Image (cartoon, rainbow, N blue to C red):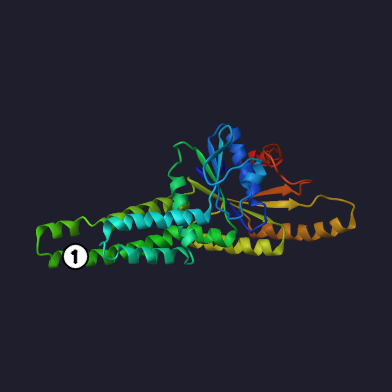
């Protein structure tokens, strides 16, 4: 399992506040310092990459250090861009009589549940297509577990939905061909731009799905704290991902309390030690890494070196 470093896509996931952004940043630094051009991507609405690296990153690919670039995906911005793209495509494939009504429906859909996830996933695919051109590795700092699970299962769900749309459209175009009184209408029905667009989207979802389930291409690492709630949430997440044929390679346990004489810390450590035993039992067979509780916050590339070395040893 120590071939995680050879994967093209590495996803860090976990409960909010578990330290997954720190781990994703440290791991990407580890890759960059081994001379592998790397992009670290934040899909978490509460972006922290800029704070950790001590440099402004934002919604465009930004160079952080040699061999390392970062981007913080803005869900609202991507959703707006996504809906504008759909409007533009619809203008070319629907009658001018109904184009305004379709635009209105798209604007309503922009506010619907799941719109941002779909838009983020489009950006997600766009970035995945950049692998090997110019990046050798892409590290994803994902949103808290629930958002991430919805995002990772989208290719399968939307792929099936698009398949049904294509069939419905093909049925409609078949009826149009039968009803066509002239050759031009029949030709237009056979080269339907709506079906072409749906087929293109289906191909992109299939590409993303292939990457996500291929253990030679993608690696998933969960970050958790040695606490009951964090363990339970991680266990549920792993179970759901397995149902979608997505495998998890490793678990990083963050904020391990050091041994001290202080009575409060001794009691907290005793509770944490029991949780660590549970983690070892429940996640047996996965790579297990441990990060100690640090004395100060991580706010720069230099601070990240404290954690980055751990990944070099863990996945070497």
* In the image: residue 27, left or right of residue 293: left
Q: Residue at x 70, y 49 (%)?
A: 290
Query: In the image, is residue 43 above or below residue 302?
Result: below
Q: Can you say which quadrant of the picture contains the C terminus?
A: top right
Give residue 24's position: percent from left, percent from top. 61, 46
Q: Is residue 234 visible?
A: yes
Residue under pointer 1: 174
Query: Foreground residue, 74 or 166?
Result: 74
Q: Residue at x 86, y 51 (%)?
A: 260
Q: Is residue 153 visible?
A: no
Query: In the image, is residue 26 above or below residue 246?
Result: above
Label 1, secondary structure: give it.
helix
Q: Residue furthest left?
A: 182
Q: Using the rendered view, name the quadrant where residue 129 is placed.
A: top left
Q: Residue at x 48, y 64 (%)?
A: 114
* In the image: residue 197, left or right of residue 224: left
Give residue 309's position: percent from left, percent from top. 68, 38
Q: Residue at x 67, y 52 (%)?
A: 19
* In the image: residue 254, left or right of residue 24: right
Query: In the image, is residue 159 above or below residue 68?
Result: below
Task: Count the labels in the image.
Answer: 1
Q: Using the rendered view, name the quadrant where residue 102 is placed.
A: bottom left
* In the image: residue 245, left or right of residue 44: left
Q: Using the rendered view, name the quadrant where residue 34 is placed.
A: top right
* Mark 1 Cα-neighbour bin, 10 Å: few <14, some 14–19, many ≥20: some
Query: Foreground residue, 262 or 72?
Result: 72
Give residue 55's position: percent from left, percent from top. 63, 40
Query: Foreground residue, 277 or 162?
Result: 162
């Amino acid at each position: 399992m120590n071939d995680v470093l050879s994967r093209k896509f590495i996803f860090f996931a976990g409960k909010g506040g578990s330290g997954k952004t720190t781990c994703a940043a440290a791991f990407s630094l580890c890759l960059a310092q081994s001379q592998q051009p790397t992009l670290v991507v934040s899909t978490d609405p509460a972006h922290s990459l800029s704070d950790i690296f001590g440099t402004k990153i934002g919604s465009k690919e930004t160079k952080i250090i040699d061999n390392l670039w970062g981007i913080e995906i803005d869900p609202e911005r991507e959703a707006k861009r996504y809906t504008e793209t759909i409007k533009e495509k619809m203008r070319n494939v629907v009658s001018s009589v109904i184009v305004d009504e379709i635009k209105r429906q798209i604007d309503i859909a922009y506010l619907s549940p799941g719109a941002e996830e779909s838009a983020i996933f489009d950006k997600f695919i766009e970035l995945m297509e950049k692998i090997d051109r110019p990046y050798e590795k892409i590290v994803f700092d994902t949103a808290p577990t629930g958002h991430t699970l919805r995002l990772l299962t989208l290719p399968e769900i939307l792929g099936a939905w698009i398949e049904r749309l294509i069939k419905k459209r093909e049925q409609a175009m078949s009826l149009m061909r039968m009803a066509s009184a002239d050759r031009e209408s029949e030709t237009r029905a056979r080269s339907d731009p709506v079906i072409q667009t749906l087929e293109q989207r289906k191909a992109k979802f299939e590409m993303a799905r292939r990457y996500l389930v291929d253990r030679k291409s993608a690696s998933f690492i969960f970050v958790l704290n040695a606490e009951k709630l964090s363990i339970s949430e991680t266990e549920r997440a792993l179970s759901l991902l397995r149902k979608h044929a997505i495998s998890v390679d490793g678990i990083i346990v963050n904020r391990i309390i050091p041994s001290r004489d202080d009575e409060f810390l001794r009691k907290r450590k005793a509770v944490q030690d029991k949780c660590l035993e549970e983690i070892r039992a429940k996640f047996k067979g996965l790579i297990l890494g441990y990060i100690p509780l640090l004395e100060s916050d991580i706010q720069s590339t230099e601070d990240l070196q404290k954690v980055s070395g751990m990944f070099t040893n863990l996945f070497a």
